[in-house]
Every structure is written in structure tokens, then in C-alpha cells.
Image (spheres, rainbow, N blue to C red):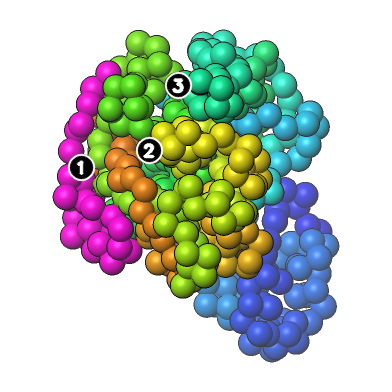
Amino acid sequence: MKQDSDLRNNLKSIRTRLGMSQQDLANIASVTRQTISGVESGQYAPSVAITLRLAKALGCQVEDLFWLERDLPEVEAVLAKPVPNGQQLRVSMARVGGQWIAYPLIGKDAFRQDMIPADGEAVAVSHPVAGVPPVVGSGEPVRVDGFPGITKLLNPKGEGTSQKGTNKVRVRLLDDNLDTLHNTVVIAGCAPVISLWARATERWHPQLRVQYNFANSMAALHSLCRGEAHIAGMHLYDPETGEYNTPFVRDVLAGRKAVLITLGVWEEGLLLKSGNPMGIRTVSDLVAGGATIVNREIGSGSRMLLEQTLQKEQIPFHAVQGFDNILKNHQDVAQAILGGVVDAGVSTASVATAFGLGFIPLHQSRYDLVILKEYLEEAPVQQLLSTLGHRLVHSQFEILGGYDISKIGEVVATV
């Protein structure tokens, strides 16, 4: 029978995964090798009897082998990041604030350790989207007392500011299981422990999916404000008020209601080579010893800590070698030190332990989850937050070291 143009199969994929040749499968299913070849190439649509025999031979369901292309739904979504028009995209999907959000799986966003599976594919077309509020911000870092880069709002140029148009796309889903997408909670943040929390939660609630989008503290907050995430994780300290996170949330959300829930308090400080061969004890030692550092991008809590510490000790930023060398996550900072590229960087005690590096504590920082009140009553968000009290989650955090979870799950502020 000639192949139906809408009929698709992954017979070859399943066969080769089981280590079977076309002839092996043909023998078990009592068909010819040419039949197997014709089905795999799309030149032949098998009868019901052959379809059942193939499924039985491979130990799977018929639906695992064959599907109709037109059965897969399409949805309209807003792209979380701008991409060139006409570019074909792999995307992951979630429902946030009543609209579909598509997260392009490009570059590092496509990987953690393994490549991230896509929920659909899309072609980017730029259209303005009504109802997406602009993000308030100056677009330039504020200079404080001659120390360039210290900021109150921490809104770097082009980072989180509103765009002239928001990309809207049609996404062809790769699976018709819309329940999974509706049950996806999106967290933007930079704490490595978020992925531990997410995996523990998914074990407890198998129908829940947690999507962790890496972003520094301020970028995560802007992502929340733009409607691209349910939860933003942040660890920013405001020396003017002595408060963590809340002043920045008030500035960026500009009147929108949110709650801040503590995930934990972590030790932040200087990551150093194992054994601390340069004898570094303070940031002043970085300058005195000619140490080279790697910094984080504007908007990150680690960069803010370094800037505030240098300012307190009256050390100009330009006096620190490598101050303008930027990496964008805790793991890359650790890898740069471990590989001998630089001598030091700012991160957390738990990251130092994970990479076997030296650590000089500078500050204890509270890491909060910021959630818009309109999302709080959504069932997937409630399921995720409910696990903050579970022993399974606590044990994952406790064995990391350098992480105080005595206040985990507490509402520390409302705005």
C-alpha cells in the first residue's frame, strides 16, 4: 500500500535502539526485509495486520510506531527571546499567565549536561503583542561614588528592557500531551539547587514538570515581569536599606503584587585554587598579590557582592585584574579557576565544595523565590511550593554544604 503523506513512523529508531537489523525484524514479524525497508523509508503503509505484528515484535504499542502528522496540534506562542525572522527553532513550551510561551533551545539554552528535548518547532515571525507590559528601567548601569557598575536597579543595557515588538510564532507540537505543558512551572534563576528541587518535586508529583531557565537575579526578575516565568529566584542585597531582594522587586514590578518565599541562605565568597597557593584572605589580597579574577555579568548577585566589597574597602574596580572578564554562571566561574585560567572568582560555598576548590566567605545571602500573586493559586505552582517542606528536598540541600535551609518555605515579604 502506498504511504499516506500524513503517516509518520519511527520504526528505524526503535529497531536500531534494540540492536536489530531489518532482516532480524522481518524474521520476527513474518514479513519481508523489503517491507521493513519500505515502511522505514515512507514508501509503504503497512496493513493493520503487519502493523500489529511489528508492534508485537518490538514490544511496544502501535501508537509508539506510527502517528498522523495532522493529529499534532499547533498553538500560537510568544517567544521568550528574540531570534532572526524565518529561523526554524526547537522550543520548549509552558503556559504562563494565560498565554503560551516558547523558549528557544539555542546554544547553551539547549543543554544542561544532555541536550534538552523539544516540545515543538516554530518559525520566528516578529509581531507586537498587545497586553505585554513594558519593563521599567534606565537601560544603563548607575555609577555610584565613581565606582562604575554598582547599581541600585541593576538593569543592564538591553537586558530585560521592553522591545519594540515581541516575537509571536506558530508552534507545531511534537506531542499531543497538552496536559504536560499545562502542568509546567517555569522558574528563572541562577541557583544550582533549583535543579535539585525540581527533580525531587517531579519524583513526588510525576504529572508535574518544572522548567528551569538559567538567569541571573535581575534578569530572572525581569523575565517574571514580562510574563515568561511563574517564579524568579534572586539573591540581591541592598546596603542602603539592609534588605535582601525586596527593594529590587518593588522597583521592577512597579506596583504588581508578589510574594517572596525563602529557598535558603547561602554562603557567598571567593572561590580559589585548591590549597589557596596565593594566600588570599580578602579582596584586598587580590590586588596586592596581582591575582586575576573572573567576574559575573551586571544583574547577578555575585557581581553585586564583589562590587560592594570593593567599594567598602575603597578599591577601584580597575585595580582588580580581570574585573571585566565576564562569565555567566557559577559553574563556569568554578571551571575557569579549576582549569588555571584565573586565580579567583565569586560564587558559593556549595559550588566550591562540588569542584574541590578553596573558599573564603564574604557574605551570607538570602535566596528568595519571587512569585506574582496571580500565579499563587495555580495548581502546578501550589504542588511545587508544597514540596519545600519535604524531607526529600531538605536532604538534597543539606548535603551540599554552605546552605542554611532553616527558613525554607517562609514568606518573608509581600509587595
Q: Name the amino acid, label 1.
A: Gly
Label 2 or label 1, whichever comes before in sequence order? 2
Q: Nearer the viewer, residue 312 or 221?
A: 312
Residue 323, percent from left and from top:
61, 42
Looking at the rendered image, the quarter that the N terminus falls into is: bottom right
Answer whether residue 414 is magenta in the image. Answer: yes
Q: Name the amino acid, label 2.
A: His
Looking at the rendered image, the quarter that the C terminus falls into is: top left
Label 3 or label 1, whichever comes before in sequence order? 3
Residue 27, percent from left and from top:
69, 89
Measure how far apart labels 3 and 1 are at the Cα level: 27 Å
On the picture, is 114 further left or further right than 230?
right
Query: Which residue is label 1 attached to?
Result: 409
Task: Tell me the SS state at disc 3.
Answer: loop
Magenta-drawn segment: 387-415
On the picture, is 326 further left or further right than 369?
right
Measure how far apart labels 2 and 3 are at the Cα level: 14 Å
Query: Which residue is label 3 attached to?
Result: 152
Outermost residue to the front = 288
Which residue is painted at 36% across and 53% down in the image? 361
Q: Nearer the viewer, residue 333 or 160?
A: 333
Q: Nearer the viewer, residue 266 or 129?
A: 266
Q: Nearer the viewer, residue 249 or 114?
A: 249
Work out whether residue 209 can be spotted: no
Residue 96, percent from left and from top:
44, 29
Query: Which residue is label 2 attached to?
Result: 235
Which residue is painted at 39% across and 23% down in the image? 248
Front position among marks 2 and 1:
2
Which quadrant of the figure has residue 339?
Answer: bottom right
